[in-house]
Amino acid sequence: MPQDPVVQKLDVHKDNSPSNSGNALNTRSVLISIGMVAALAELSYAVMNLSAMPVYLKFSMGYPAGMITSICAAFLMCEGVMKGPFGILGDRVGRKWLIVAGPVLSVFTSILTVFVSANQWYFFVLLRVIDGLGAAALWPSALVMIADLVPENRRSQAMSMFNVTYMVGLALGPFIGGSANDLTRKLMPHAHDPRQASFYITAILFAITAVIAGIRIPDIRPTHETSSEHEGGSGVKEFFQHLRSIPEMLTMAFVTFLGIGLIMQIIKLFAIDEFNVSESQYGALLIIPCLFIGGFSMVLGTLGDRIGRVKAIRIGIGLCAISLWALIFIHSEWALVVGGSIIGVGFVISFPAWMAHVSATCDPRQRGAIMGAVGTAQGLGAVIGVPVGGLLYDHANINLPFVHSQHPSHYVPFIGCALLLIVAWLIATFAIKESKGVTRTVESPS
């Protein structure tokens, strides 16, 4: 299989002379740089989205869960809608400065959040929209840069790097955010609001992310600059024609993240309400399983290259669905940890295979646009799921005899997520087909 033009271009720019070996632009060093930025960005967004915002809006602002998830949905809506346009922009102007711009925006939104009062809910929405713009600029560009650099038969393995960064963020984000709040409460008992400490932490993390991205990420120019075929097939018309050819992929992306959205912003509130854990205790419960999964994610991520990407997607989503049902039937914080761990395993199997499968269907010149469009479908699903999950969490008066809880409505979003994951598994099983020409053997790294 011929290399993509970007990979060929990298090879041209390699400098193997001893004097310049430290500055040589090679695939491995670029992947390491993207991994560093992705890890810090995931950690920053995890502290912000999974720890700081839900708790701050509920206990400091006094908002109900439905309002909290609606505010958080503004982030997801903007991120989801703008991934496609930013993907197109990255195809045309390059990826680096979009990756840098994302965390820079969130430095300012993190600081500004602490100055918003409870009756100014619309400012929380505005700041969440700006954060969404930053995330939409960062993630498609980072994913597409990897797809550009790595040969197709090793792409699942490379994409699994994002599993490591996600698990690091999921493991440390709630712990860092919750510990910062709890520690501030102990050391500064007369502080105006100890829960604001998380936002200063996120501002610092986002600033470090932006600096490293600016220094380490190379300014690789778009593929079409070196492609003589550009004039014939990378326009908007061809882009929409390609989208019409992948309705099953867009549908599966939407359904999966509709389910994830139902529980995304209420998991921490669920643990606090159901099991009476503190913020730092909740974070501590996640550290060991998430780091364990992250440690094995590079191995699990190669499954798509070995057995086929679509088969890996089916296995991963199936594990997630089964584990979520087990979590629903067993009312225990340890069930939450164990079930969540198995869901994490399913995620690290399916996600890199999914992104590699999507990238394999794209013309390299439109890879950012197509992967951004699939990201938009995911985002739209989450946008709908998040506020619906909050409303169900507060107001779903449904008799659930198999749920042993004083608040059965708290489990309704989880049941909805489990049902939608089954639908996603059915789509993956009967509608998603293996892309042509996928090689199922993993080459040893050069």
Image (spheres, helix red, strand yellow):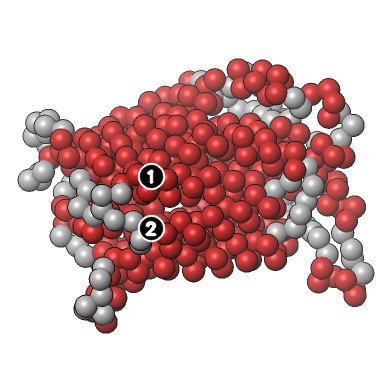
Q: Cβ–Cβ below 8 Å for labels 1 and 2?
A: no
Can residue 199 be seen? yes
Q: Going by the picture, which residue comes out furthest to the bottom?
A: 187
Q: Residues within 10 Å of mark 1 (few under 14, many from 20)?
A: some
Q: How many marks?
A: 2
Q: Relative to the observer, which residue lies in front, 4 or 321?
A: 4
Q: Could you say where residue 275 lies in the image, as x and y percent from the top left?
A: 16, 57
Check the picture and name the quadrant holding the C terminus: bottom right
Q: Could you say where residue 434 lies in the image, as x and y percent from the top left?
A: 61, 28
Residue located beneath label 1 in the image: 125
Q: Could you say where residue 283 lies in the image, as x and y percent from the top left?
A: 32, 64
Q: Residue at x 59, y 49 (%)?
A: 138
Q: Which mark is residue 292?
A: none
Q: Secondary structure at mark 2?
A: helix
First in sequence: mark 1 or mark 2?
2
Q: Could you say where residue 341 lies in the image, as x and y percent from the top left?
A: 36, 53
Q: Amino acid at mark 2?
A: Thr
Q: Residue at x 74, y 46 (%)?
A: 94
Residue located beneath label 2 in the image: 113
Can you say whether 181 is above or below 424 in the image? below
Q: Is residue 410 left or right of residue 106?
A: left
Can residue 429 be seen? no
Q: Quadrant of residue 213?
A: bottom right
Q: Going by the picture, which residue comes out furthest to the right?
A: 17
Can you say whether 433 is above or below 394 in the image? above
Check the picture and name the quadrant holding the N terminus: top right
Q: Secondary structure at mark 1?
A: helix
Q: Residue at x 90, y 31 (%)?
A: 228
Q: Residue at x 73, y 30 (%)?
A: 363
